[in-house]
Image (cartoon, helix red, strand yellow):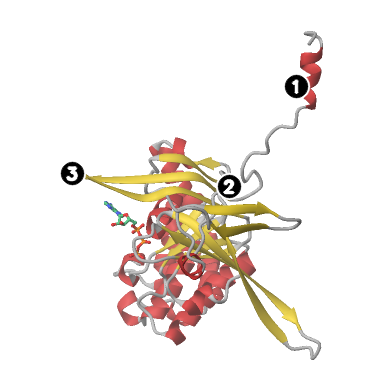
Amino acid sequence: MSQGTLPGLGAAAPRAAEFGRDALVVCDNLVRIYQTGSIEVQALQGLDLLVDAGEMVAVVGASGSGKSTLLAVLSGLDAPTAGRVRVGSWDLMAMSRRDQLAYRRSTVGFVWQQTARNLVPYLTAAQNVALPLVLAGSPRRARPARVAELLELVGVGHCAGRRPQEMSGGEQQRVAIAVALANAPQLVLADEPTGELDTATSQQVFEALRAANRELGATVVVVTHDPTVSGQVERTVAIRDGRTSSEVLRRTEVGADGAHAVVAEEYAVMDRAGRVQIPADHRAALDLTRRVRLTLEADAVSVRRDDGARR
Ligand SMILES: Nc1ncnc2c1ncn2[C@@H]1O[C@H](COP(=O)(O)OP(=O)(O)OP(=O)(O)O)[C@@H](O)[C@H]1O
């Protein structure tokens, strides 16, 4: 090969597209190991997740599967042990303390499960929503209109002058969403926001998150055990053992009679190394054990039991 061809070859070689280049949230092979004494817990074990700007995504999974750890990483409160995590233009692995503060004030809003943790108890709803505006140095004159707009958006304008103990749990959570939205974050993270609420109240809190998504364009990632919430978003991501294992996509179809029906389809998630987790019930039904036979077909890859000698 002559030396003269090398620059030409370099120019022609396709560059591997960066994983999730156009996504707002990129989690690439995230690992989080907690060390308590001699015990090591792998809370995230190579988790990949992409969320596009404007999406509303529910994250579900058994207790201990790593959901809260994922949200803590995305909120900038916790740092992963390895991997790559980016939100917008922020590389969360390489943030100084000052960056972390700026990130939390400008880019991300957070709603916790415990209603008491979200609001300052001795401030009214309006004062709670104004607080992040004050901390971000927003002009004093613009604040009352912004506060009123946000409280109206989440349906608790009537609570403006009340302190948290003078509101129901659902009202407090909706005020908490308004607080999270105050500085117009690109990303809103909610960890079990309806965990302490009954079904009817959960629906109101979910509607407030949906308003943030649809009307303000905020991208929302909500961790939930609540089927009322996970059943109403277009994408539900399931986490198992610190990895994304499956996704349910929902779309609305209009039938011949004009009626709307939601169609939900479940997909397994393939990681970047090509690994797919076969659900336990599928494995049990076909007695799939350690070794399986893979066959490439015209439009599918089949997975069959190894009927050869068991070793
Ligand atoms: N600070 C910590 N120190 C040690 N281990 C931790 C810590 N935080 C979480 N873990 C462990 O990491 C794993 C994942 O925890 P995580 O809270 O992310 O799960 P989760 O899916 O949010 O669970 P839940 O639904 O019960 O809130 C668990 O085994 C948990 O015990």
Is tag 2's residue or tag 3's residue first in the polypeptide sequence? 3
Looking at the rendered structure, the secondary structure element under dot 3 is: loop
For residue 167, the mark is none
Q: CA distance from mark 1 to mark 3?
A: 50 Å
Q: Amino acid at mark 3?
A: Gly
Q: Amino acid at mark 2?
A: Gly
Instruction: Say which residue label 1 marks.
Output: 10
Which sits in the foreground, 72 or 255? 255
Query: Which quarter of the image is occupied by the N terminus?
Result: top right
**Can you tell which of label 2 and label 3 is closer to the viewer?**
2
Identity of the residue drawn at 52% across and 79% down? 155
Q: Is residue 134 above or below residue 83?
A: below
Can residue 238 be seen here? The reply is: yes
Query: Mark 2 near ligand 1 (CB under 8 Å)?
Result: no
Q: CA distance from mark 2 to mark 3?
A: 35 Å
Is tag 1's residue or tag 3's residue first in the polypeptide sequence? 1
CB atoms at circles 1 and 2 under 8 Å apart? no
Looking at the rendered structure, the secondary structure element under dot 2 is: loop
Instruction: Say which residue label 2 marks.
Output: 274
* Residue 193 position by quadrant: bottom left
Q: Is residue 226 above or below residue 183?
A: below
Taking the image in four quarters, ligand 1 sits in the one at bottom left
Is tag 1's residue or tag 2's residue first in the polypeptide sequence? 1
CB atoms at circles 1 and 3 under 8 Å apart? no
Q: Amino acid at mark 1?
A: Gly
- In percent of width and height, residue 185 lies at 54, 56
Looking at the rendered structure, the secondary structure element under dot 1 is: helix
Could you classify mark 2 by the number of other residues whose Cα lies within 10 Å: few (under 14), some (14-19), or many (20 or more)? Answer: few
Which sits in the foreground, 102 or 10? 10
Instruction: Say which residue label 3 marks.
Output: 37
